[in-house]
């Protein structure tokens, strides 16, 4: 059995906890830009394990990556250059949900940007890929929730 993530080459300052039970992945971590690929690999492995179709998995991976990129861009770094985030990913009967929690209480704002700008399209991308989204401001920051529906399965008669 091989581990989901090989951490032998990782910086010792990277800190994370995770729990995975019954179609649910719960992660709390300190993240830097270079860690996004590791989180994507963990999320991809769980979506595969839960037998989520490739199209839904790709959409969810893109959304999670965008939400964590927003954490990196809009929250304060600690002394090690890390940002704190939580990710809850769950397989539900008709799709997959994800909640990304960060310490910034400001909700995402839609901005119309220059077509050649490198940023400013995150919320538009999120709305295009997710079937439903919401934001809850909390006393500790905010939660951004997304839902992506899985394709209908044919019923057997």
Image (cartoon, rainbow, N blue to C red):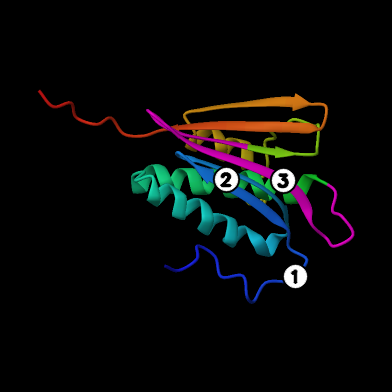
Q: Is residue 109 visible?
A: no
Q: Is residue 155 visible?
A: yes
Label 3 or label 1, whichever comes before in sequence order: 1
The residue that mark 2 highlights is 64
Spatial separation of the CA atoms under disc 2 and disc 3: 12 Å
Residue 59: x and y in percent read 45, 44
Q: Main secondary structure of the magenta part?
A: strand
Above or below — where is 62 with respect to 35? above
Q: Residue at x 79, y 57 (%)?
A: 82
The quadrant of the picture occupied by the N terminus is bottom left
In terms of depth relative to the viewer, which is nearer, 156 or 114?
Answer: 156
Give me the disc on residue 85: 3
What residue range appears in magenta? 76-99
Report the side of 80 relative to 86 (left or right).
right
Q: Is residue 54 left or right of residue 32?
A: left
Please give the label number shown on residue 12: 1
| Residue 74 position by quadrant | top right
Q: Quadrant of residue 103?
A: top right
Residue 72 image point, x, y percent: 74, 51
Q: Is residue 94 magenta?
A: yes
Please check the rendered image and state whether residue 146 is part of the magenta-colored stretch, yes or no. Answer: no
Percent of width and height locating residue 154: 19, 30
Between residues 112 and 79, which one lies in front from this camera angle? 79
Q: Nearer the viewer, mark 2 or mark 3?
A: 3
């Amino acid at each position: 059995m091989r581990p989901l993530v090989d951490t032998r080459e990782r910086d010792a300052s990277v800190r994370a906890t995770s729990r995975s039970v019954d179609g649910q992945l719960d992660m709390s971590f300190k993240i830097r830009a270079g860690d996004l690929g590791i989180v994507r690999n963990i999320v991809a492995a769980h979506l595969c394990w839960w037998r989520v179709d490739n199209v839904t998995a790709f959409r969810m991976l893109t959304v999670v990556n965008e939400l964590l990129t927003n954490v990196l861009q809009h929250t304060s770094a600690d002394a090690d250059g890390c940002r704190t985030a939580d990710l809850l990913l769950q397989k539900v009967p008709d799709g997959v949900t994800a909640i990304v929690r960060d310490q910034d209480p400001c909700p995402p704002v839609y901005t119309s940007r220059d077509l050649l700008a490198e940023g400013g399209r995150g919320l538009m991308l999120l709305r295009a890929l997710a079937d439903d989204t919401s934001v809850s401001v909390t006393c500790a920051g905010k939660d951004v929730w997304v839902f992506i529906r899985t394709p209908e399965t044919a019923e057997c008669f």
